[in-house]
Image (cartoon, rainbow, N blue to C red):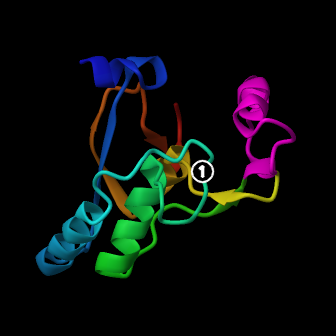
Amino acid sequence: AQWKARGVKGRLLVLRPTGVEDAAKQRVVAEAKRHLGKPYDALFGWGDEAMYCSELVRKAYAAGAGVEYGKLEKLGTLDVAGLKREISERYRGPIPVDLELVTPASLAADARLEVVYSDFPEARQGGALTL
């Protein structure tokens, strides 16, 4: 319950990939387990020394099943108006607008991932994510 409360308005969206064979799923889990114990990457780097949530999902499925979910986006193209101060403090200076990352919203918008559970009013409308 505490973990869920940290999300957007305390809501939860659970997604499942479609068309991924059981053997590939096992490889994905093994790949994800390789990263257990690594620190959280609050700077959203793409290296493997530390990981952030969406990076782990994308990399585990890419290595284990050959599928890249979500899309890489440049930080400068994202609507982070309400977070600019926090992001600037996190980077201790200018926001690295060319930094590429994959976001939870990008994963949630990927139509190849089916909605298993959502307590958002409408998880998707016409393929687009509605939070």
Q: Please indicate whether residue 21 sits to the left or right of residue 118 in the image.
A: left
Q: Quadrant location of residue 24?
A: bottom left
Q: Is residue 126 visible?
A: no
- In the orientation shown, which residue stands out farthest toward the right? 94
Could you tell me which residue is drawn at 78 percent across and 35 percent down?
A: 92
Q: Position of residue 70 (x, y in %)?
A: 51, 61
Could you tell me which residue is drawn at 57 percent across and 41 percent down?
A: 42
Work out whether residue 114 or residue 90 is closer to the camera in this orientation and state it.
90
Identify residue for label 1: 44
Q: Position of residue 19 (x, y in %)?
A: 25, 74
Could you tell me which residue is drawn at 32 percent across and 54 percent down?
A: 114
Could you tell me which residue is drawn at 30 percent across and 51 percent down?
A: 37
Vertical order, 49 against 26 (above or below): above
- Badge 1 element: loop
Quarter of the N terminus within the rendering: top left
Q: Position of residue 55 (x, y in %)?
A: 48, 58
Q: Residues within 10 Å of mark 1 (few under 14, many from 20)?
A: some
Vertical order, 59 against 12 (above or below): below
Q: What's the magenta bit mostly, secondary-structure-wise?
A: helix
Q: Please indicate whether residue 90 sits to the left or right of residue 50 in the image.
A: right
Work out whether residue 73 or residue 34 is closer to the camera in this orientation and state it.
34
Q: Which residues are magenta?
A: 75-96
Q: How many marks?
A: 1
Q: Position of residue 62 (x, y in %)?
A: 40, 75
Amino acid type, residue under disc 1 in the picture: Phe
Work out whether residue 85 or residue 16 is closer to the camera in this orientation and state it.
85
